[in-house]
Image (cartoon, rainbow, N blue to C red):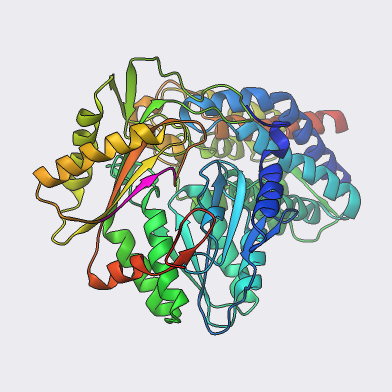
């Protein structure tokens, strides 16, 4: 079973992963975006660490809900509302249980990913976060975190040949082809951090 | 770059703005720029915002006759809902607030969230999307047309209507009419460098230009060998007129992207006016300068807005902001 501390460590691991990948995310965001995805997410997850330390929420749902709200308040751009909604809606779906199973987290993440799709109006294949998130939650069924992480990474890599249909990269039309999507790449970090946290716990 | 560190670029600019403009209230910590006399009793308040890097848009357009408040985000990054809600609460006199939102995914999502939160606080909020950029043609497979130069026309004309004391419903309708009557097209002669990256966001060799660029350092849809000012004017004006068939005089904005000298912009305006005359489009008013910029990008955009007598009267009405000032 996964408790609030597990979720706090997941968010911390995500913040560390984002720190490490910030330069690469910004680099990926240069040819097809506006060269700030790394710094924006870095600012957001740093703020998430601070608020989780300060308020120490006691349930898995409360950790993710607070993290999501903090991202909405600090990131801006499209990433803030989208990542914020992912975590907030996942957290709300977890309810106020003190501990949740991997299968319950898988179900809640599905709710969160569906909310991201609804908010952004995107679908898999549009070269967005969803190209990593959807394969990840598909692979997660039952709580296989390593499989989810690997599916997210493959999903992110598979965005390279796609033409963007949503977000700022869509303005490039065919010229968006040949670049890996920064949002899908950072989404894979979230699942890599989840797998890492689960491995450290077991 | 003339900066301290990339992380404080927006905060530093706000501190400088506060020092230069005592007629504004600049809340540096919460990143909101307000009319000093807000809320103005009985009047609708216009609130806009967006990523920084487009100055004087939006903060430079706060003042009597235009915006009541502006919310600057990080460079090229939409501000967060907290800023917009704070701004709305500070400027609402009870007559309502109009959010003016450029059509980018981030701006739309954050302003949508802010509108919901502001309404929860009892503030009446209306929203108008600005989407004038004809370079984005295929709205089915993109995020839709971008908001660029027409934002200035919307903020000025709707701001004048608000200043006269017109209702929220009416101010919103005027803002929509202006947006629907305006189209833009931009070109870049060089890419811009964001403070976070420190180098150009795309590679544009000398001797080439990008046609149909946006205002966030994103490349355009097509690259060509360098053209003359006259050729660029023909390309840009024709692109705009393909989408807008004016049956009345137009306002023309010949806008610099940030690193093109006024000497070149005025020369470019001469060519724009020539093409418009050849196409039989009468020009009611022209504005030349750097108004909706993209950091240090070299290049220009052309925005045309068809106006009736009422819109022209509102355009001519007094305005007093850091970036646009006449008649008072």
Left of B274 or right of it: where is B63?
Answer: right
Quick one: B267 or B228, which is closer to the camera?
B267
In this rendering, does residue A144 appear at all? no
Side (left or right) of B278 relative to B30: left
Look at 29% across and 69% down and name the residue there. B311
Residue A183 lies, in percent from the top left, at: 56, 35
Quarter holding residue B171: bottom left
* Pick the front one: B285 or B304: B285
> On screen, A171 above or below A121?
above
Report the residue at 78% width, 40% height from top: A46
Give the percent coordinates (x, y) of residue A4: 86, 49
Farthest-out residue, front: B328
Across and down, in percent, residue B187 comes to 33, 32
Q: Residue at x 56, y 67 (%)?
A: B68
Hey, which quadrant is residue A168 in on the image?
top left
User: Which residues make up the magenta segment?
Assistant: B285-290
Q: Camera-side residue: B35 or B217? A: B35
Say whether residue B289 is magenta.
yes
The N terminus of chain A appears in which quarter of the rendering? top right
């Amino acid at each position: 079973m996964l408790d609030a501390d597990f979720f706090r460590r997941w968010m911390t691991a995500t913040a560390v992963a984002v720190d490490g990948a910030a330069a690469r995310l910004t680099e990926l965001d240069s040819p097809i975006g506006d060269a700030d995805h790394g710094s924006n997410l870095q600012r957001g997850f740093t703020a998430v660490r601070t608020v989780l330390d300060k308020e120490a929420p006691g349930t898995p749902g409360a950790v993710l809900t607070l993290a999501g709200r903090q991202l909405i308040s600090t990131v801006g751009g499209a990433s803030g509302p989208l990542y914020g909604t992912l975590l907030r809606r996942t957290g709300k779906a977890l309810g106020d249980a003190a501990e949740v199973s991997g299968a319950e987290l898988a179900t809640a993440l599905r709710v969160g990913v569906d909310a991201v799709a609804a908010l952004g109006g995107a679908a898999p294949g549009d070269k967005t976060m969803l190209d990593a998130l959807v394969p990840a939650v598909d692979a997660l069924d039952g709580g296989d975190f390593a499989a989810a992480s690997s599916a997210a990474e493959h999903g992110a890599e598979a965005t390279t040949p796609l033409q963007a249909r949503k977000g700022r990269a869509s303005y490039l039309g065919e010229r968006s082809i040949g670049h890996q999507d920064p949002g899908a790449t950072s989404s894979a970090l979230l699942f890599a951090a989840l797998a890492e946290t689960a491995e450290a716990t077991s | 770059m003339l900066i301290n560190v990339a992380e404080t670029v927006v905060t530093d600019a706000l501190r400088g703005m506060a020092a230069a403009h005592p007629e504004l209230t600049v809340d540096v910590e919460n990143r909101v720029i307000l009319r000093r006399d807000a809320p103005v009793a009985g009047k609708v308040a216009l609130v806009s915002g967006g990523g920084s890097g487009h100055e004087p848009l939006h903060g430079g357009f706060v003042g009597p006759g235009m915006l009541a408040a502006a919310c600057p985000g990080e460079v090229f990054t939409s501000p967060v809902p907290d800023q917009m809600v704070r701004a709305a609460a500070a400027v609402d006199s009870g007559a309502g607030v109009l959010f003016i939102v450029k059509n980018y995914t981030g701006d739309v999502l954050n302003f949508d969230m802010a509108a919901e939160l502001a309404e929860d606080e009892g503030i009446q909020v209306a929203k108008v999307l600005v989407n004038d950029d004809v370079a984005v043609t295929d709205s089915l497979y993109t995020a839709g047309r971008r908001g660029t130069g027409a934002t200035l026309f919307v903020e000025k004309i709707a701001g004048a209507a608000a200043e006269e004391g017109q209702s929220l419903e009416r101010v919103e309708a005027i803002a929509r009419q202006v947006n629907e009557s305006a189209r833009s097209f931009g070109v870049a002669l060089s890419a811009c460098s964001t403070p976070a990256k420190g180098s150009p966001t795309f590679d544009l060799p000398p001797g080439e230009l990008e046609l149909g660029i946006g205002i966030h350092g994103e490349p355009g849809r097509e690259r060509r060998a360098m053209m003359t000012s006259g050729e660029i004017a023909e390309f840009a004006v024709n692109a705009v007129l393909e989408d807008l068939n004016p049956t009345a005089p137009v306002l023309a904005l010949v806008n610099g992207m940030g690193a093109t000298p006024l000497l070149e912009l005025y020369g470019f305006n001469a060519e724009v006016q020539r093409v418009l005359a050849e196409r039989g489009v009468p020009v009611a008013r022209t504005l030349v300068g750097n108004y909706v910029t993209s950091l240090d990008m070299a290049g220009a955009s052309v925005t045309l807005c068809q106006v009736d007598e009422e819109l022209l009267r509102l355009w001519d009405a007094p305005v007093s902001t850091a970036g646009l000032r006449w008649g008072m």
